[in-house]
Structure formats: C-alpha cells, structure tokens
Amino acid sequence: MGNKDIKKTSKERVFSGAQPTGNMHLGNYLGALKNWVRLQDDYECLYCVVDLHAITTFQDPKTLRANTREAAAAYIASGIDPKTSILFNQSAVPAHAELAWIFNCVARLGWLNRMTQFKDKAGKHKERASVGLYVYPTLMASDILLYKADRVPVGEDQKQHLELTRDIAQKFNNDFGVDFFPMVEPVILKEGARVMSLKDGTQKMSKSDASELSRINLTDDADTIAKKIRKARTDSEPIPGDVESLAARPEALNLITIYGALADKPRADVCTEFAGKGFADFKAALSDLAVAKLSPITAEMARLRADPGYVDGILKDGAGRANALASPILKDIHKIIGLT
Ligand code: TYM
C-alpha cells in the first residue's frame, strides 16, 4: 500500500477502546459502545481491544485470550461494523507500546501522580502495584495519538486520562517545536456516561465489583436481567415529575438514567412519563426495555462465540489496517525526535 493510500482521509478520526478483563456490562455499553456505533458513519473510527492495558493487573493467559475475543464479539454485536470501522487488538500493533515508551519520556511524574484511577486501582498498597499500572495513561495517550485521532468517545471515568493525553501532546509539540499531535476532544454523552452500580448508586458499575447483582452483563439472559433489575436498590418514594428532585436519591436517579439511555430519551421525559408511579411498576417497564435492547446483542455474542475463527479474522484484518495507518506516523515521530 502506497503512502497516498494511507494518508488521513478527509473524515476526522475517532479512537476508543475497552479492556478485555471480563464481562462487558451495561455501563460499557451505554457509556461507550453505543456512542461508538453512532459515530462510525461520520468519522473514520478505530476501535481497539486494549489487551496491553489489561495485563497491568495479572491476567491468566488463557482467560485473556478468550476475553479478547469476547470483547471483540461485544463490539460487533453492539453494532460496530468491522468493514467500516477498524476493529483490532492493541498488542497486534507493536507501535502502541513503542510510542508509549516515548511518552514515558515526555510525561512528568507529577502528572501521573495525580491520576485518580491509579489511586483507586492500586488502593492502599501502591508499592505493590505494577509499574505498568502506574504508566497506564501514557499507553492510553499512545493509543490515541499514534493515529492522530481527533475525538475519543468514552465514559466520564476516562476524562482525566484524556486531559493527560492533551498535556502529553502539547508538551511533545512544544519540546520539539512542531505542530504534530492534535488536541484530542473527548466525546462524553450528557446522559449515560456514568452508569452506577445497581446495589449502590454512589459507585460506578464495574467489572471488578464483587457482587454480580451490581451490574448487568452483556451476556446475561432475559431472566437474569429481570432478576437483577428487580433486586436493584431503590427507595420507597414514587418517581417525581422532574429530574432535579432525584438529586439526593442516587439509586433512583441511576435507574431513570439507564431507562433514558436505553430508550434514547432525556431523563426529564422519563420522569414525566412515570411521574407518581412506584418503583415496582417502573422496574417492570425498565426490565422489558433492557431485555428488548440487550437480548439481540446477547444472541449475537453467543453466535460469534461459536465462530472464533470469524472473530480472529476480523481482528487480523483490523490489525493490518491499523498498522498501515500507524507506521508512517511513527516514522514521522522518529524523525522529529532524532531516532533515525
Ligand atoms: P474500560 O475498559 O474500563 O471501559 C471501557 C469504556 O466503558 C466506559 N465505562 C463506563 N461508562 C459509563 N458507566 C460506567 N459504569 C462505565 N464503566 C466503564 C469507560 O469510560 C470506557 O469508555 N482506559 C480505558 C480503555 C482505553 C481507552 C484507550 C479508551 C485504553 N486506551 C484509548 C479510549 C481511548 C478503560 O479502561 O476503559
């Protein structure tokens, strides 16, 4: 493929990714995947399964391999078209790791020390965390900037990492006197960017929560979804006619948010629709909606699980296309910093 063919197209470029560390859940779907699907016709999109990020905490090799396929299947089942978008796994494009090293030499310790995700994940024993977990955000900056992506659709929790990506891009440009990396723009939905645990409305829905009842997995069947919604924590007050009145009711607000995001309706409209109703009625409606929206995804994932060769083929094709986009950019970076 000649250079002419791999030049950036006139469409702006989008990059995003998720870690293959277990079941993808409703938070991943509403905060990220749904937004990715929406962007694929208007942008040139790269969607990555970030396996190198996953190994910042120990992963059993067999499980990691299976989870990487499973994450790719979740992307496809959610509506990512692997012909339009580039779907690949991070380790299949070695330039990610190389640029991350270069960014380790650009980013400052003080910047990384401020990262709240490291503090949350490392907990009290940060000296026992891997060095990889600490420099996780420089690899993330590399994922995005390796393709000079303009926009990055993520959930709210990734905002700080994107600010760091901009700081790295800016410092690189300043240090070397170039206007090379773009200033990436996060694409964060107004509603749905922060889906909370079904058991505690102050904690985000997460793969690492010990309670299965805290999250809806994209692999859950209809009965499991219904059971989890039935058992979701709420309060005894009815649903108010306006969202503002939910400010001090995090669990209630979370269920309204989920309903709105699944139905593509503002939360205010959901409140108007259910005003005065109790949570028993609302949960029944939410359960029907969640099953209707998620079961086609679950079914498609099951189909793809039975055809691993198909998923592997898509990842391989995506890696080839991603490599072709990354190579000339990495070459330019080498030139800029004097590595050639
Ligand atoms: P990860 O794997 O934790 O999550 C993948 C995406 O799902 C979003 N998300 C949520 N959104 C709403 N509510 C929730 N409860 C929720 N939980 C997760 C995340 O915000 C994310 O968009 N560091 C990233 C992966 C990554 C990446 C990148 C993203 C690596 N390189 C480059 C964008 C660009 C992560 O751990 O996501």
Image (spheres, rainbow, N blue to C red):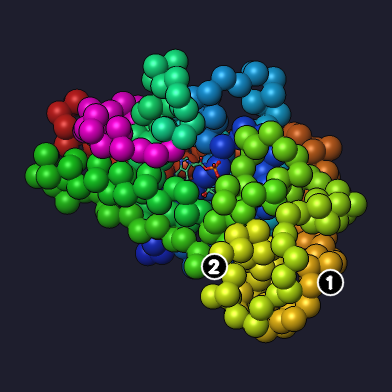
Q: Is residue 154 left or right of residue 297?
A: left
Locate residue 266, reporting x and y percent.
60, 76
Residue 6 colored in magenta in the image: no
Q: Position of residue 311 (x, y in %)?
A: 70, 39
The residue under the point 33% across, 54% down is 184
The relative height of residue 16 versus residue 289 in the rendered view (above or below) is above
Task: Name the residue furthest right.
Answer: 223
Residue 192 in the image: state x and y as whole percent. Answer: 58, 62
Query: Which residue is tagged 1?
Result: 281
Q: Tag 1, which secondary structure?
A: helix
State whether residue 70 appears in this view: no
Give the side of residue 195 with respect to residue 115, left or right: right
| Kind of residue at badge 1 | Asp
Location of residue 269 (image quadrant): bottom right
For the N terminus, the quadrant is top left
Specify whether 249 is left or right of 15. Answer: right
Q: Nearer the viewer, residue 143 or 83?
A: 143
Residue toward you, 222 or 270: 270
Instruction: Determine which residue is flagged by label 2.
Output: 247
Over which residues does the magenta segment extend?
A: 96-117
| Residue at the image point whose x is 72% and y is 62% from the top | 235
